[in-house]
Image (cartoon, helix red, strand yellow):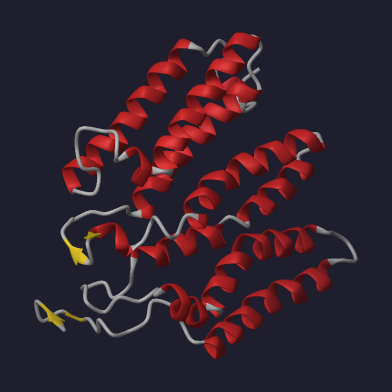
């Protein structure tokens, strides 16, 4: 397909590379950093730090890409009936692969002398949005566009829209909640964040009880906006320690 005479778009081209290409890319990227780490190990361990940060950050993504054919056979990653050539579930699996970045955050926290319990907690919170959306790939997929086997909705449940909103709620709400000083505020923040978490992770179930359809574009925008508005209203009511102080940006 030629677009405006400028771009030649092949809708039958796969989103992910084949296994051989992925293997070559992994060997090239990780090999260079590993050689650098070994070469500099006599006077610094920063090389190994960067190597493991890269491994944890990209490892999950490479796994998803490497097994994309198997995932496609089982879950239908590719959809050549639309212009982008891939389905919503491919976004969900990509987010699932990205969740391993939490291990990189855990390593950074340890290197920054943050105690291990806080490091684990922050890493879990960081991974939560990616795991929550990624593991619900049967909801965040192209079937959310359909009703009785026919495509009738123009938005569906797009993981790339839901995940950022969920990340905002989790990162602000849970981090603030676990580090608040007042027990009432802690409970209120965790409960309000959990409400938004359920609202965003289970849209197909909530859809049965709301007066609009959240699989249309307008309904989707309203649905996501409701989550953010409710969250920040509750967040502002039960916050006593500034978020920048919680994160250690100020004393």
At 55% from the left and 62% from the top, the residue drawn is 97
At 33% from the left and 72% from the top, the residue drawn is 86
In the rendered image, residue 146, in percent from the top left (x then y), is placed at 23, 61
- 239 in relation to 99, above or below: above
Pick the residue in front: 134 or 144.
144
Left or right of 249? Residue 93 is left
In the rendered image, residue 130, in percent from the top left (x then y), is placed at 52, 51
- 203 in relation to 49, above or below: above
Furthest residue toward bottom: 20
Left or right of 187? Residue 193 is left
Furthest residue toward front: 148
Left or right of 203? Residue 34 is right
- 18 in relation to 157, above or below: below
Q: Locate the N terminus and report the quarter of the image it occupies.
A: bottom left
Inspect this view and state whether residue 114 appears.
no
Q: Quadrant of residue 186?
A: top right
């Amino acid at each position: 397909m030629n677009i405006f005479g400028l771009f030649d778009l092949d809708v039958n081209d796969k989103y992910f590379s084949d296994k051989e290409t992925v293997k070559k890319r992994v060997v090239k990227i990780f090999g260079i950093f590993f050689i650098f780490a070994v070469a500099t190990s006599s006077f610094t361990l920063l090389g190994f730090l960067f190597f493991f940060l890269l491994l944890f950050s990209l490892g999950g993504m490479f796994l998803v890409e490497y097994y994309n054919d198997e995932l496609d056979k089982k879950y239908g990653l590719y959809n050549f009936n639309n212009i982008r050539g891939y389905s919503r579930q491919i976004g969900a699996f990509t987010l699932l692969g990205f969740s391993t970045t939490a291990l990189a955050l855990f390593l950074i926290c340890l290197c920054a002398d943050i105690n291990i319990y806080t490091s684990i907690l922050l890493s879990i919170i960081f991974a939560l949005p990616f795991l929550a959306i990624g593991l619900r790939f049967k909801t965040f997929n192209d079937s959310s566009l359909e009703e009785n086997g026919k495509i009738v909705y123009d938005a569906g449940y797009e993981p790339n829209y839901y995940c950022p909103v969920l990340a905002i709620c989790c990162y602000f709400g849970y981090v603030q909640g676990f580090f608040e000083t007042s027990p009432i505020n802690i409970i209120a923040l965790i409960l309000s964040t959990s409400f938004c978490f359920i609202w965003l992770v289970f849209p197909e179930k909530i859809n049965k009880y709301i007066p609009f359809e959240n699989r249309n574009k307008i309904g989707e925008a309203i649905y996501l906006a409701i989550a953010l508005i409710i969250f920040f209203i509750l967040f502002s009511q039960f916050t006593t320690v500034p978020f920048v102080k919680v994160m250690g940006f100020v004393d």
